[in-house]
Amino acid sequence: MTHRASVAASNRLEAFSDAVFAIIITIMVLGLHPPAGHKFNDLAQLRPVFLSYLLSFIYLMIYWNNHHHLLRTLEIPSGWTMWANAHLLFWLSLVPFSTAWLGANGGAKAPTALYGFTLLMPAISYTLLQIAIIKSHGNDSPLEKALGRDVKGKTSLVFYVIAIGLALAAPLISYSFYIAVAIMWVVPDRRIASELNADHHE
């Protein structure tokens, strides 16, 4: 495959992914319904729904941002990387459902645990996508160099597992773990961009 063709294939994969991200966010925001009343005080009943939407929106933006940088390292999309990317998008597409259930039943054990599960699975699938990209490059992968030991990624997985377990006993504590992971990733991950810039200047 020529360089132009590989770039076109990578751009096509990213364009498709961006469209899915946009659809997921659109579906999620459609779950926000106006209150029955006509006073500002009536908006208070939407607080749990809005907060769950806000947290999920932040998570989706984190994935969208880092996914963009991740695909910059992809030279030639292989069948494995395309399926790994589809796997990630599948789990992210379930976020609107778990967000709606959590918002409608804030503090309940099952919705809190399911919400954590729909955060854990995209994190796992994102890790698998990283592995697929690294394997497609063989030795000396720029992505592998950038990730290093990937402490943040591994820590996130541990936090999700702990939060899901706590959801069955103390849902409010689970929320603190979900928020903590979001805060940990809300600052754009510059490892990949730094590694690509270093390779470019060599």
Image (cartoon, rainbow, N blue to C red):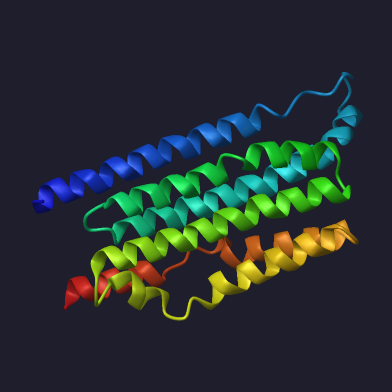
Depth check, front residue: 18 or 123: 123
Is residue 128 found left or right of 168 in the rendered image?
A: left
Is residue 137 found left or right of 42 in the rendered image?
A: left
Q: Is residue 176 visible?
A: no
Residue 161 found in image quarter: bottom right
Residue at 61% in and 50% down: 58
Where the C terminus falls, by quadrant?
bottom left
Is residue 3 found left or right of 29 in the rendered image?
A: left
Depth check, front residue: 188 or 75: 75
Number of numbered discs visible in the structure rendering = 0
Is residue 49 found left or right of 136 in the rendered image?
A: right
Residue 180 found in image quarter: bottom right
Depth check, front residue: 26 or 134: 134
Residue at 70% in and 29% down: 31
Residue extending farthest to the left is 2
Q: Whole-percent x and y of residue 101?
A: 77, 38
Q: Whole-percent x and y of residue 12?
A: 28, 40
Q: Whole-percent x and y of residue 39?
A: 89, 23
Query: Is residue 152 shown above or below 15?
Result: below
Residue at 60% in and 52% down: 59
Q: Is residue 105 visible?
A: yes
Query: Is residue 58 shown above or below 103?
Result: below
Residue extending farthest to the bottom is 149
Residue at 80% in and 61% down: 174
Query: Is residue 33 shown above or below 96?
Result: above
